[in-house]
Image (spheres, coloured by chain):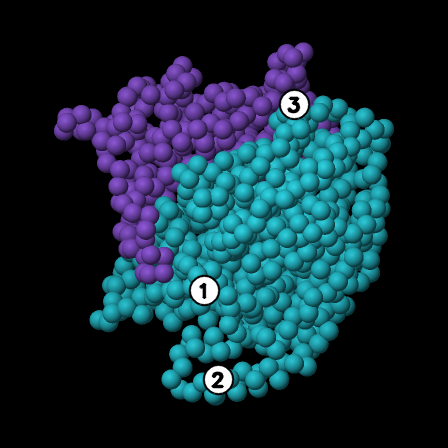
Chain colours: A purple, B cyan
Amino acid sequence: MSSPRTISFDIFRYDPQDPNDKPKMVTYEITEAPGMTVFIALNLLREQQDPSLQFDFVCRAGICGSCAMVINGKPTLACRTLTANFPDGKIKLMPLPGFELIGDLSVNTGKFMRELAERLQLWLQPDSNDIDIHRLENPMDPAEAAKLYELERCVECGVCVSACATKQMKDTFVGAVGMMKIARFEMDSRDTRTAEDFYHVIGNQDGVFGCMTLLGCQDACPKDLPHMQQIAYLRRKMAQTIVSC
Amino acid sequence: MKIIYTDSLVVGAGLAGLRVAIASKERGLDTVVLSLIPAKRSHSAAAQGGMQASLGNTVKGMGDDEDVHFQDTVKGSDWGCDQDVARMFAHCAPKAVRELANWGVPWSRITAGDRQVVVNAEKVTITEAEKAHGLINARDFGGTKKWRTCYTADGTGHSLLYAVDNKAIEMDIPVHERIEALSLIHDGKRCHGVIARCLITGELRAYIGKATTIATGGYGRIYEVSTNAIICEGIGQALALDTGVAALGNMEAVQFHPTAIVPVGILTTEGCRGDGGLLRDKDGHRFMPDYEPEKKELASRDVVSRRMTEHMRKGKGVDSPYGPHLWLDITLLGRKHVETNLREVKEICENFLGIDPAKDWIPVRPTQHYSMGGIRINATGESPQLAGLFSVGEAACWDMHGFNRLGGNSLAETVVGGMIIGKYVADFCEKNTLEINTQVIDDTMSKLQGEIDELLVGEGTENVFDIKLAMQRIMMDYVGIFRNGPELEKAVSELKDLLKRSKNIGLKCKKRHANPELVEALRVPRMLRVALTVACGANARTESRGAHAREDYPQRNDKEWLNRTLSTWPDENALEPELHYEQLDVMKMELPPGYRGYGNDNAVAHPDTAAREAQIADILAKLGDDADRFDKQAAIMPFELPETLRPRNERLSDTSLVSGEK
């Protein structure tokens, strides 16, 4: 086996709470190990070289969405990015744009997603909340259940938001994450909201008609969600709503 | 000092915490949830395989009910559980599944007619009833008699967490994110809330509640390799322990999951084996039938993990730079199955191993997975020592898992426990007023402030990251899957040294706000105290029960050890906890101790077992032939539940729907 190589990390550093601090890039070097991910490398850097380095990880397994950052220009999940994927051994890390910066690579996606959920009312709105939990459940078409789960796989990592040119120009745009969730509830037979109800929320320039269809969301989504299909589906639905009015 | 007052304060925004918060808010109580992270990122999201509930919809679940689920749970616990709690739980699990369907969980559904499944490495066809079409499906899991694990593909935890958090958002329940609770405010008798630190600004705040519920998950990260999210560090348990009053229960009961990938310890779900996946050794030989001819790969997790370790010790493991491992083979399930029902597994294999599990075997080995121990609470969720302190989910020792938890019962515990305990928390808030001397808040705040000041201005020389890693390695090497006296002694002694050293931590980063090194420095001594409760409890327990396996004491000793370990830390300067024991009363058990049906049957009987069996036979004889299963159960072991949760669960077999089933 050849000797392990040294890789370099060029990392964005800025503490917005320190009035004397200025944004800068700082370079760190580390010896690569087999199977090393950006998660492993960042933790080693913090433990061995700079304990002030800020970044977020929770599950480290690609399922919680907390570690999204821009790696060599592409927004993605750091926990499942293998350092071996970069042949020249140079890795540049930036925080996700489009979110409030907490410090270094850490951004406040949680605050953004909660506000979005409140604004778009992203929860199931059934006919009645008064369903008897002691009785047999209502049946659901197995294909519908499978399809709903397909759309529900979003982990709120924020990658689609940071990969979206429309969102970068227009802060009020709901982004692919908002539309995917609307589509999920629109398709749920248990949800009583109609296309007209959803039209009031996303039938405008902040919603489906603002999307420039550059599809950064679909290209970058770490869960391979069918954003393109859902946005097109919602557009058709919303357009039909106008025609039928 | 900022003081925030509420009725129901919940620490932890995973499924269990959110479910308690919802129960509080439903009663109109002011409710605040604290969380290290956004709620939807909680470790609950990682539960892939599903949750157990005896719906009995699928043909392989026919005949299932609360009784069977209860028995599986008690056997799984190796008779270490609280049988009242197991009853409460089994009774409410179907209700929780149906409630979650109403809140948005799509649950995988049954398609009527024939379908092919893999059972014991062979393809068989099962036929689902017409009348079951569209009802909630269930898959097979280890240690259960029926197919009972309800699931949403292999993202059940994700699906549940999103539905429950959405419900919490709908109900306008505030979740204070990036806030870490570090001290409980209490007066030795009653808990009043917590002092918490904002991880962004460093601000310390007091949160005062009538009831305080700890729902912070398990303590897996005291081990070096764990399937747990990296936030599962046992700080919730430490909060209770550091009161010196509240006890932790059964901390030595730590479960290892058989199939985490090598080297990083990310889990591949038990659904892999439930759906028909096999374990193979370096020769490709399927070895589990040699050890467990009846249950094979689907014996209880503790049994499978130990058999794997035994097999590797015989030299049958596959050598790797990270030590030996075995193979998990799911190739026989077919690509379609892997890409739909086991897609998370497929993604993990692709991203972390660079393999395709539909054609390649997956390198796996047993890895720390679940904390059966936790804050000791009674059946209503409250600490017996500290009124107003509640706990729920993996953070707690409720105690329905005893010494080993069945797959599918952890996710179930979060929502079922949250549903039941949430009602008791709300009751407590309605019956009690806030009574607090603000001096108690000031004192707790000053103490924590002092701890932080000392770390920031002190001249300590110890590196916090080094101490943490040393602790994690000690736990891995000496308090692992097989345990013995000399190694446990060594663990206790080395952990004590680390605890001493941790009083001399020095920081390089001196920032008072957003300082990851300070966060570690506050956590590590707390984690060490938790680790010591595990190591000391394990050392003292000279028997093998469930996941706690002693090489030097291989028997399950009901005669001497049918009890629960209680750990407290009354002297804050001490280097180890005080251990006490709480006896389990065989004469009150519905199911007296017996053989689990897998693993070795080598138990030393409890003297009361025969007496209780005779008593139960007598009760049943007196009831007569007209008694149904509910009458029998109530006569043997009556149990309490909040009024609204008492109604019986309807099943397909109870309705006229099943007549005409093919």
Q: Position of residue B196 (x, y in %)?
A: 65, 35
Percent across and percent down for residue B229 are 59, 43
Q: Which mark is residue B91?
A: 1
Residue B311's tag is none
Q: What kind of residue is marked 1?
A: His
Residue that carries the numbered disc 3 in the rendered image: A8
Q: Nearer the viewer, residue B5 or B18?
A: B5
What whole-number distance in Å separates the C-alpha atoms at marks 2 and 1?
Answer: 21 Å
- Give the CA separation, mark 3 to mark 1: 56 Å
For disc 3, the chain is A
What amino acid is at disc 3? Answer: Ser
Residue holding disc 2:
B620
Of B592 and B428, the residue lying toward us: B428
In the image: residue B183, left or right of residue B19: right
SS of the residue at dot 3? Answer: strand
Residue B203 image-quadrant placement: top right
Please name the amino acid that badge 2 sits on. Leu
